[in-house]
């Protein structure tokens, strides 16, 4: 039987112990605020400067020597096309590599070395990828200073992110589900196709979006492979022009992307160009947020049936 | 360790379905099964009992080559001879997938796929290349009936398997194991995560299933072994201590160790 005095002593202990909860939650809120506030201040500042500049013409005009006429048409089209190439090349490669490492690779020292180096790849500065791509894609393969070269460069850059995300979401699938599939007589490929990929797709998608969000803002490697900073035409749409372009001619077109356009404008002395840069920055952040929003929605859809 | 005398234990008119012969198994350096031998009789229930960690699951998972999924596991001697074709299931020449197509398994915790009830059962048929919708429908229905689940789910086959109760989920897993017409079904403590009513229905089901299929079941519950099995094997520290007809083993065990365990003086 507890005495009343014992109860008081217990309560005192609990109160004392709970001070740490209070302390830590305050610390947590503070850390969170530092991160969020910095972003909000930057974003709001950019929005105040740039949003009034946004207009239909801003999206449909090429860059110009006169700030008031300049627009981001070539930049946003370039960014979307480069991202398309990046996604189409990095996602299949990254997912295939991740699945191979988790489901097929024999557990030996070669696999261990490969695994360690994938994490190392993620830490290499992006400019180094730019140099590699300049030699490999631009000159050796002869892709030139094109959308294809840029897309592949960024694909290399985000490949480790996708591989790691794939492996982690595969590992999150309970062993029991894995065994259930094999116990039904499935081969490894049947297990991957029918279970591993469907159940890990939400996690893989998150990795893809994180990678893409990083790639969309990359400037250094794109400049290294020779993106133009001033470009007043669009790649030929498939089957347009004379003689008609092929379905994939656009991948060899010269291009620019949003961050390079911003970089170009911020390096001009005129204040009007700074406003243009802020407006373009706002659009770029908005593109990233839209991508994240899409990811959240898809993740919700994909995870609806999965409870673990 | 004395090898149990198979013929002595067999009852008139029973047919051997499989024989474990001097089986040694290692998890890396750990010797988990030591010269284990036992018979499995066709269309009978054989129970594996013994204290936690004695190797019951390890032995059971040899039957469908589950150990092949993990590196470091090693079948080190002896084998499991499958009848009537007289093949050693553990021989490296035998494809583990072929073994799993003939011997299916029900796990300790219900593990339905995060798919519909229908797709859960149909999966073992789909991996065998069955595509015909009518054929699939028929087989899914008869498997669900065989698992005594049809009446409860026939009007919601499209719902997620995970939305069923624990006992229903386990019967769904039994239906999945049953759909492919296996020769043996392995059960690893199938009722340990279930309440007494769900347990009773699974036990009843096992007793019905043995009309058509051979059953090997691991259980922690000695009453359960006594109720549902025809033969019982008692294991201890990776060795087969005693194998016998369930009634005889529980009433008059041959070994002192077995007697201590089943009377609760040990374990
Ligand atoms: N993957 C593994 N790696 C190494 N040792 C293992 C592994 N799995 C099981 N063991 C060991 O093998 C022995 C037998 O394990 P097993 O799971 O077969 O026991 P069990 O009889 O099924 O026990 P329980 O009744 O608790 O399920 C135990 O000593 C266990 O620690
Ligand atoms: Mg076990």
Image (cartoon, coloured by chain):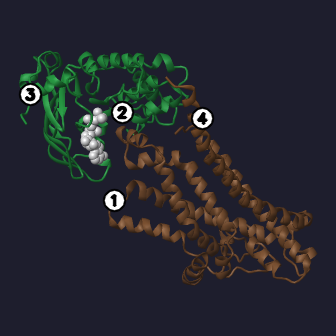
| Residue bearing the label numbered 2 | B107
Give the CA separation, mark 4 to mark 3.
66 Å
Give the vertical position of A155 relative to B188 (above or below): below
Label 2: state its secondary structure.
loop
Give the CA separation, mark 3 to mark 2.
28 Å
Residue B233: horizontal and vertical position, in percent? 18, 27
Give the CA separation, mark 2 to mark 1.
26 Å
Give the CA separation, mark 3 to mark 1.
40 Å
Who's green, chain-wise?
B
- Residue at the spot 45% in from the left edge and 70% down from the top edge: A117
Task: Tell me where residue B144 sits by quadrant.
Answer: top left
| Residue bearing the label numbered 3 | B6
Task: Tell me where residue A236 sits by quadrant.
Answer: bottom right
| Residue bearing the label numbered 4 | A11
Seen in the image, is B262 located left or right of residue B142? left
Label 3: state its secondary structure.
helix
């Amino acid at each position: 039987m507890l005495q009343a005095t014992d109860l008081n002593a217990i309560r005192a202990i609990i109160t004392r112990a709970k001070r740490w909860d209070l302390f830590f939650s305050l610390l947590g809120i503070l850390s969170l605020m530092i991160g969020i506030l910095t972003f909000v201040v930057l974003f709001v500042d950019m929005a105040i400067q740039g949003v009034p500049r946004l207009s239909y013409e801003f999206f449909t005009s090429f860059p110009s020597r006169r700030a008031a006429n300049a627009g981001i048409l070539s930049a946003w089209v370039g960014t979307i096309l480069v991202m398309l190439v990046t996604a189409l090349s990095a996602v299949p490669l990254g997912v295939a590599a991740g699945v191979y490492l988790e489901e097929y690779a024999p557990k030996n020292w070669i696999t261990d070395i490969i695994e360690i180096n994938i994490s190392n790849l993620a830490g290499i500065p992006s400019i180094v990828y730019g140099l590699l791509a300049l030699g490999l894609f631009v000159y050796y393969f002869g892709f030139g200073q094109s959308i294809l070269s840029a897309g592949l460069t960024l694909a290399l850059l985000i490949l480790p992110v996708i591989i790691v995300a794939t492996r982690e979401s595969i590992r999150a699938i309970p062993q029991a589900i894995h065994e259930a599939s094999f116990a039904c007589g499935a081969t490894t490929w049947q297990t991957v196709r029918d279970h591993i990929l469907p159940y890990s797709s939400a996690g893989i998608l998150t990795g893809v979006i994180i990678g893409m969000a990083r790639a969309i803002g990359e400037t250094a490697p794109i400049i290294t492979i020779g993106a133009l900073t001033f470009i007043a035409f669009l790649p030929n749409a498939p089957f347009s022009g004379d003689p008609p372009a092929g379905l994939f001619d656009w991948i060899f077109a010269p291009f620019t992307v949003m961050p390079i356009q911003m970089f170009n404008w911020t390096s001009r002395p005129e204040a009007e160009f700074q406003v243009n840069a802020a407006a373009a920055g706002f659009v770029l952040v908005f593109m990233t947020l839209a991508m994240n929003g899409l990811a959240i929605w898809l993740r919700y859809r994909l995870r609806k049936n999965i409870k673990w | 360790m004395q090898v149990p005398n198979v013929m002595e234990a067999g009852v008139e008119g029973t047919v051997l379905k499989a024989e474990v012969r001097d089986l040694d198994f290692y998890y890396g350096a750990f010797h988990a099964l030591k010269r284990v031998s036992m018979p499995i009789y066709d269309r009978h229930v054989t129970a594996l009992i013994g204290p936690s960690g004695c190797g019951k699951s390890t032995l059971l998972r040899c039957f469908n080559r589950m150990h092949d999924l993990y590196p470091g596991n090693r079948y080190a001697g002896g084998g499991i001879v499958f009848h009537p074709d007289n093949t050693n299931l553990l021989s490296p020449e035998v494809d583990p997938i072929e073994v799993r197509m003939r011997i299916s398994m029900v796990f300790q915790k219900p593990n339905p796929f995060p798919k519909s009830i229908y797709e859960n059962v149909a999966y073992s048929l789909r991996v065998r290349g069955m595509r015909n919708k009518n054929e699939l429908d028929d087989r899914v229905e008869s498997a669900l009936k065989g698992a005594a689940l049809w009446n409860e789910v026939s009007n919601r086959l499209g719902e997620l398997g995970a939305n069923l109760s624990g006992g229903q989920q386990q019967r769904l897993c039994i239906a999945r194991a049953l759909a492919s017409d296996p020769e043996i079904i392995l059960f690893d403590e199938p009722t340990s995560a279930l309440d007494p009513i769900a347990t009773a229905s699974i036990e009843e089901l096992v007793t019905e299933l043995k009309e058509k299929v051979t059953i090997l079941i691991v259980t922690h519950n000695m009453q359960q072994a006594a109720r549902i099995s025809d033969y019982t094997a008692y294991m201890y520290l990776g060795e087969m201590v005693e194998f016998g007809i369930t009634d005889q083993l529980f009433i008059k065990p041959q070994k002192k160790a077995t007697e201590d365990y089943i009377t609760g003086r040990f374990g």
